[in-house]
């Protein structure tokens, strides 16, 4: 029997890998092992619980205010033993976090084949997003199976001379997850609080935005809320203490802004579905929003998800207070502009990415 090990460590990786774990576990001729690095702690546990995934290994590396050096060295030193003990036939990593890069690097050192889920996303600027663009480019050098979500992602890999035979377009497993979470009759008391208002969902956490850029984003949100009395904001805040302190400083005492703890993914997806629009610097939310038909102002200078821009759902607005404010205001006052951005389109596949990836692995590992 061939052995597949999945390694992941943060919330978004878990959301997009747990459906794959559960699919792989249905395959009788594959043995599936899960190793979490614990780069995230509470935010990871939330997701594992929802998808009922119990890891075989937890490296439990998270430290408060961890640096890239902390994460990289802790994972690299602890993962060796697990890989040497289990000797998997393939290791699957996801996306672009430090967990992703370091796990792939460890596999390379031990000459274990790597499969990269969500391969081929690019901004072309290794400092934006930081360090994710470097991480995903580096993993592409190593990986033997590249599971690209879209044709554009495949083309990015081909431009870097990756062998076409290693690239499979599967759609994004985010859509597989989204298919299971949205509920028509969803109820939550936070949504009741916002029911007579236009609800804006806000998230922010990117490393390159910590400090002034994040302060600038929040100032724009504050200005809009002061001006538009029918707007309420729910902000499920990331657990990073640096993010928390900036958010409390700028948005802490606003009646129509609720800063709440990170939501479980089922809740978060339903909050998005019931919102008017979204402001974020997140990656994954840029994939979910087009399916839900919710306009997104992406508060970053670059995006690796041009499919959502092309679909018309995403608008890249950077981190300047005035630019965010102007775009935000336009979508509140100009119904035409809002309608143009709120058509539900899904560039990320039909929700069968996990089945396709499992099929490809069964076929190729069997040979
Ligand atoms: C990480 C990823 C980023 C991804 C994001 C998803 C890297 C370098 N960054 O960034 O690509 O978009 O996850 O959210 O891989 N913390 C907790 N509990 C948790 C999680 C985090 O307390 O469950 C706090 C800790 O103080 C931790 C800090 O948040 O040190 C930052 O976590 P870290 O994983 O280093 O960075 P993220 O910004 O979460
Ligand atoms: N998400 C969640 N709860 C929250 C906020 C986000 O479950 O309170 C989900 C969201 O639906 C998406 C993922 O977390 O699937 C995005 O995670 P994050 O923004 O932390 O990371 P990124 O995608 O930017 O790497």
Image (spheres, rainbow, N blue to C red):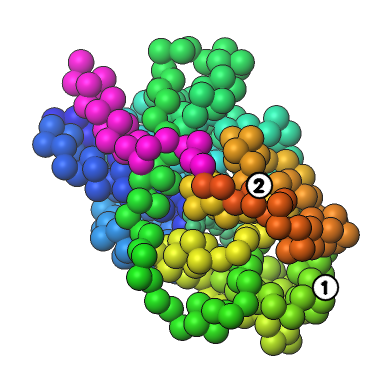
Figure check: 139 above or below 318: above
Figure check: 88 above or below 174: above
Q: Is residue 101 left or right of residue 330?
A: left
Which picture quadrant has residue 110? top left
Magenta span: 345-367
Q: Answer yes or no: is residue 109 visible.
A: no
At a point 43% along the width and 46% down the height, the residue shown is: 174
Secondary-structure class at tag 1:
helix
Secondary-structure class at tag 2:
helix
Count residues near mark 2 (Cα–Cα under 10 Å), then give few for <14, some for 14-19, many for 20+: some
Q: Which residue is mark 1?
A: 223
Of 37 and 48, the residue lying toward us: 48
Of 332 and 45, the residue lying toward us: 332
How far apart are the two marked residues, 2 and 1, measured between alpha carbons?
Answer: 24 Å
Q: Is mark 1 within 8 Å of ligand 2?
A: no
Q: Quadrant of the C terminus?
A: top left
Q: Is residue 177 left or right of residue 334?
A: left
Specify whether residue 354 is painted magenta: yes
Of 139 and 219, the residue lying toward us: 219
Q: Main secondary structure of the magenta part?
A: helix
Specify whether residue 224 is painted magenta: no
Earlier residue among tags 2 and 1: 1
Q: Which residue is mark 2?
A: 340
């Amino acid at each position: 029997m061939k052995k597949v090990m999945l390694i992941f460590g943060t919330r978004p990786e878990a959301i997009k890998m747990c459906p794959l774990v559960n699919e792989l576990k249905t395959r009788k001729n594959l043995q599936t092992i899960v190793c979490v690095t614990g780069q995230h702690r509470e935010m990871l546990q939330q997701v594992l619980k929802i998808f009922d995934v119990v890891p075989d290994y937890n490296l439990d590396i998270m430290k408060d205010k961890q640096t890239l050096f902390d994460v990289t060295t802790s994972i690299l030193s602890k993962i060796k033993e697990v890989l040497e003990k289990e000797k998997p036939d393939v290791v699957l990593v996801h996306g672009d976090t430090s967990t992703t890069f370091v796990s792939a690097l460890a596999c390379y050192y031990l000459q274990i084949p790597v499969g990269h889920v969500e391969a081929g996303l690019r901004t072309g600027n290794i400092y934006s997003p930081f360090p994710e663009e470097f991480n995903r480019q580096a993993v592409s050098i190593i990986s033997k199976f590249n599971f690209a979500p879209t044709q554009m992602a495949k083309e990015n890999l081909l431009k870097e001379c990756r062998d076409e035979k290693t690239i499979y377009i599967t759609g994004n497993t985010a859509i597989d997850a989204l298919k299971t979470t949205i509920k028509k009759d969803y109820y939550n008391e936070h949504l009741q609080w916002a029911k007579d208002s236009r609800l804006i969902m806000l998230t922010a956490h990117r490393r390159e935005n910590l400090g002034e850029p994040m302060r600038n984003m929040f100032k724009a949100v504050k200005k809009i809320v002061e001006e538009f009395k029918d707007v309420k904001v729910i902000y499920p805040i990331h657990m990073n203490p640096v993010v928390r302190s900036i958010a409390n400083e700028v948005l802490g005492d606003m009646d129509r802004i609720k800063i709440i703890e990170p939501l479980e993914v089922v809740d978060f997806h339903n909050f998005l579905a019931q919102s008017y629009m979204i402001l974020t610097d997140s990656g994954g939310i840029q994939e979910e929003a087009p399916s839900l038909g919710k306009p997104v102002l992406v508060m970053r200078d670059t995006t690796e998800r041009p499919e959502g821009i092309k679909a018309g759902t995403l608008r890249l607005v950077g981190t300047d207070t005035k630019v965010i404010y102007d775009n935000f205001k336009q979508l509140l006052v100009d119904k035409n502009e809002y309608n143009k951005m709120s058509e539900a389109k899904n560039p990320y596949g039909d929700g069968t990415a996990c089945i396709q990836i499992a099929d490809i692995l069964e076929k190729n590992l069997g040979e």
